[in-house]
Each structure stands twice: as C-alpha cells, then as structure tokens.
Amino acid sequence: MTTELRRLRNYIDGEFRDAADGRTIEVINPATGEAYATSPLSGQADVDAAMEAAAAAFPAWRDTTPSERQKVLLKIADAFEERAEELIAAEVENTGKPVALTASEEIPPMVDQIRFFAGAARLLEGRSAGEYMEGMTSIIRREPVGVCAQVAPWNYPMMMAVWKFAPALAAGNTVVLKPSDTTPASTVLMAEIIGSIVPKGVFNVICGDRETGRAMVEHPTPAMASITGSVRAGMQVAESAAKDVKRVHLELGGKAPVVVFEDTDIEKAVEDISVAGFFNAGQDCTAATRVLVHESIHDEFVAALAKAATDTKTGQPDDEDVLYGPLNNANQLKQVAGFIDRLPAHAKVEAGGHRVGDKGYFYAPTVVSGLKQDDEIVQNEVFGPVITVQSFTDEAQALEFANGVEYALASSVWTKDHQRAMRMSRSLDFGCVWINTHIPLVAEMPHGGFKKSGYGKDLSAYGFEDYTRIKHVMTSLG
C-alpha cells in the first residue's frame, strides 16, 4: 500500500490555491528519504496572481500607522507561540532537524525577532528637519519600498522566512515569499497563521523551483528582491534585478574563519567550536567550518577536535541525544561527500568522512587537517558537518589565511589577549567578528556580509531600514 501524500498549496490573496496549471513537486523528508507531501510547482500565472494581490494590498497597508502594524506583528508572534508544536512538526518534517533543538533554538528566537520588528515599526527615523536654505524647511520621510519578492533557503526555512517578512511588513511593504522547493511545509503553515491576522494580499506564499524564483525576481511589480541562498543564485538575482533597477538584498554563502591563538583554553574552545561547526549539520552560512590554529598547539587542538567530532551524534529527529539531523537533500549529501572524495593527498581525515546509515541523508561529523590555503575544501563552502584545520605561525599569517577567501560573512577570534582581539576584529574582513565565541545572534544586531557573501543586513534597525526608502520634502516658508 502507498501512503497518500499531503497536499500543500500556495497562499495568494487570502486563499489557498493549487498551481494554475496543476503541476506539483514531491517533497522529501530528509530523515527518511521518502516523500511525504506534494507542493505546487508555480509558474508565471501564479507569480502574476501573487504580485497582483500584493500590489493591490499595498496602498492600504502602507497607509496603516506604525502602531497598527506593530499590533499585527505582535499578534503574529503570539500566534507562533501558541502554535509552536505545529510549526516544529512541520519544520522537522521539512528538514529532519532534532525536535528538541528546533523547539529550544528556533521558536524562541523567531518570536523574539518578530517582536523586535514590531517595535522597529514605530521608529521610522530620519535626519533632523530644519532650514538648510534660507526660507525653506526640509524634512525626511522614510517610506516602504512597495511589493517585496522574497526567496528563503532550505537550511532554516522558518527562521529565514521571519527574517524576511517581519521587517518588510513592519515597514509597510507587502510580501510575496517563496520557500525552497525542498522545504515548503512550514512556510505554508506560516501563511495559514499570518493570513488569519493580516489583510488579504499583504502576505502571499508561492511554492516552486528555481524558475519560479526567477519569475518572481524578473516580474515588473516588485520594488525589491531579497534572497538568502548560494553565491551563484545571488549573482543571477542581481543580474536579473538590474534590468529594471530593482533594489536587491542578498545574504549568500560563508566560509567563516575561526582563529585560535596559543593562549586559548583549548578544552573550552573545542567544545564551543565543534558545536558551532556541526550544529544543523553544518548547514549554516556562519558555521565554524574553517579553523586556523597556532602551530604551537596545532596537534593538541586537532586531537581534541577529532575526539569531539567522534563524540558528536547525528540521527533521527526524535532522538534527544543527537546534535544534528540529516543533510537537507540527496544533492547536498552528494556535494558534501564529493569534497571529501576529492581531498588532496596531503590532507588527513581525522574523524568522520562518511555517510551514516542507508536511510535518509546523514553524514558523520568530520574533521580534516593538513590542508593548504588554496585547497578546494578551504576555499569553497561545503555546507555540511565538516570542519577543516590549518596551522599558522603568527598573527599576520592568521589574517592572511582568514581573509584569503571570497566569502566575508562571519568570523571568530579565540585569545585571552584583549589588544590582539581588538587588532584582529579590526582587520578581519567579515560582517561579524565574534571573540571567544562563535554563532550567537540577537535581534538587535545586524547580520550580513561583504564580498561574495552579499550585501544588505538582516535583523536589527539596519535590516529594518533596508526595507524602506528615503524621501526629501522641502517647503517654502514664504
């Protein structure tokens, strides 16, 4: 007997709909490798309908007061808390993540982030009004940009959706959001929850593949396109958006250096770095994947990190002892395994380096040493539970290695020397520098990178401002 697959649907103009042409995609549970649902494969007609709905809803939503938008976002946050178990179940089915960690590490931050942006809605700041020309008063208006086309990734489907829709709605924009084709379930549930709170057309969800996302970005209606994804996808979005001068917000890949100096508490550093590298199966743009350790403690550090990897457990979502679940999809498993298969002869796999089991897409916690700066696995994002280790001789070489990649999202420095930490944080060319920690985020602080990690900020007042535009109004006093 075959189990009937659950049917997910688009949410457009306040109602759930199938794709206009009826096409669907099977959605796979990565913990089992088996299909559990079908999702719309949305085409141009669906994109047109969603954009039309968002455009029609924009004038009224734009004209709501900040306090009204704040109340709506607070209601959304409360509803997410009340329906947390449903959201967790959908996300676990989406991703195979551990249930307990999804409950403790995702729902509370998501709710907090929505509430932060609810407050930000009432802080539409501009420069001081005044007379900068005799007989004239200038004022600054901060306004919403319009319809926002948003594409969320598969590594944190719920949380990345929050990072996109919350500041957009808070600023007075309307939204058309597309989840990844492999993780639509939690976003469709979000649409049900949010749709019961906001006016129809303000928040829309369409499911589909890369072509669906491309059609969204190329559509003439959106004033802004926001994507969290690969560098390749970001470059395609930027190129496409340039044709009609859309505003673009890109949060792309990462290759975070973790610089460990000789005065570091090795035991504590290994404990924190292993978690920051393996959490969510390393499927995190800020993951602590690239360790640079001083040559005097290299061997001791590698041995300790390899043991930590061996002690780290991956497994099914209901196992409370696991740190992480499967890789998201079969292609990602193939990509991660490929990096290990192609390692140069001078590299050494200290732990892991293999698939776990024959069901689902699990990969063992992996540590690789003996690497050189120009090795593929050092330069390119693996996006899996793999930590590489290189040694350095002094501070200058540590900086050379740390900055010597095309990504520039996050980094960390581990040392007891305050002045050294300050020098490193100044010189590291990354959007975030942690000192003696790695990966914590708060709603009040910005998240975003430089170079090929993209541009624009998520979270914080800076993330909120990205969804606004500035208008100068000048009036004569005569």
Image (tube, rainbow, N blue to C red):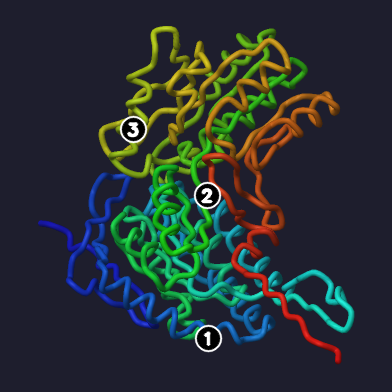
Q: In the figure, 426 relative to 90: above or below? A: above
Mark 2 vs 3, N-terminal side:
2
Dot 2 falls on a residue whose secondary structure is strand
Dot 1 falls on a residue whose secondary structure is helix
Q: Quadrant of the N terminus?
A: bottom left
CB atoms at circles 2 and 1 under 8 Å apart? Answer: no
The residue to which callout 2 is attached is 251
Q: Amino acid at mark 3?
A: Gln
Front position among marks 2 and 1: 1
Whole-percent x, y for residue 39 in the image: 26, 63
Q: In the figure, 387 relative to 53: above or below? A: above
Front position among marks 3 and 1: 1
Front position among marks 2 and 3: 2
> Tag 1: Cα neighbours inside 10 Å, few (<14), some, or many (≥20)?
some
Q: In the drawing, does residue 260 fall left or right of residue 234?
A: right
The residue positioned 64% from the left and 34% from the top of the image is 411
The residue to which callout 1 is attached is 59
